[in-house]
């Protein structure tokens, strides 16, 4: 399950935006291990948004998941990688107070050893992207 850096928690009190780093495979292909995120704390959420939340059973752990739908008791969250686990199928709906913010932007650092012009151009084309809502998330949930 993606774990996020705690430095974003310190900045949240001052600014509505903060940074985080992804570790783990549960949001592949949308997010990969090592991706940097821009998080909008307190943003209004909709089904399909990628969100940062506190793990319901281990609240010092921050995770990133996709908000699939609203349910009684909070948000039902799923990872984009169905084989990774660590989402609402394991711990149920996440209460609103544990959902901290919405991921707005993803930056993928340049891999070590890329020196050719072609590799640099390819990296530039995919390194930074907005993280958009996936409207198919709630349909995938109903299909399970």
Image (tube, helix red, strand yellow):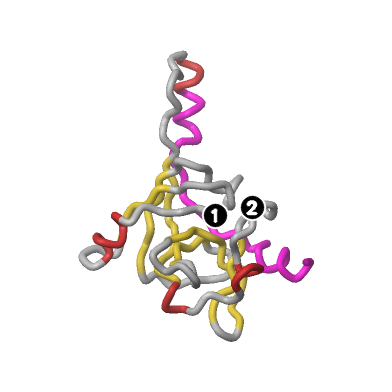
Residue 78, x across and y down, in percent: 61, 63
Indicate yes or no whether the magenta region holds residue 142. Answer: yes
Range drawn in magenta: 121-144
Rendered location of residue 140, percent (x, y): 72, 63
Residue placed under numbered mark 2 in the picture? 84
Contact (Cβ within 8 Å) of mark 1 with mark 2: yes
Which of the 4 image quarters holds residue 80?
Answer: bottom right
Quarter placement of the C terminus: bottom right
Q: Secondary structure at mark 1?
A: loop
Disc 1: CA contacts within 10 A as few (<14), some (14-19) or many (>=20): many
Looking at the image, which is closer to me, 12 or 87? 87
Location of residue 10 with respect to 38 vertically, above or below = below
Q: Secondary structure at mark 2?
A: loop
Quadrant of residue 115 within the rendered picture: top left
Point 60% across, 64% down: residue:
87
Residue at point 69%, 55% (across, down):
82
Q: How far across and how far down the image is residue 60, in percent?
A: 38, 65
First along the sequence among labels 1 and 2? 1
Image coordinates for residue 86, horizontal then vertical, percent: 59, 60
Residue 80 vs 69, above or below: the answer is: above
Q: In the figure, 31 relative to 100: above or below?
A: above
Residue bearing mark 1: 1
> What whole-number distance in Å separates the C-alpha atoms at marks 1 and 2?
7 Å
């Amino acid at each position: 399950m993606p774990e996020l850096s705690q430095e974003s928690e310190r900045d949240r009190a001052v600014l509505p935006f903060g940074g985080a780093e992804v570790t783990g495979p549960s949001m592949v292909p949308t997010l990969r291990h090592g991706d940097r995120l821009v998080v909008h704390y307190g943003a209004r959420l909709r089904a399909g948004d990628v969100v940062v939340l506190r793990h319901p059973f281990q609240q010092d752990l921050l995770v990133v998941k996709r908000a699939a739908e609203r349910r009684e008791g909070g948000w039902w969250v799923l990872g984009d990688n169905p084989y990774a686990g660590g989402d609402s199928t394991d711990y149920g709906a996440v209460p609103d107070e544990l959902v901290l913010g919405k991921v707005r932007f993803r930056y993928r650092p340049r891999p070590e050893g890329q020196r050719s012009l072609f590799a640099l151009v390819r990296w530039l084309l995919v390194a930074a992207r907005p993280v958009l809502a996936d409207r198919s998330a709630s349909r995938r949930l109903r299909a399970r």
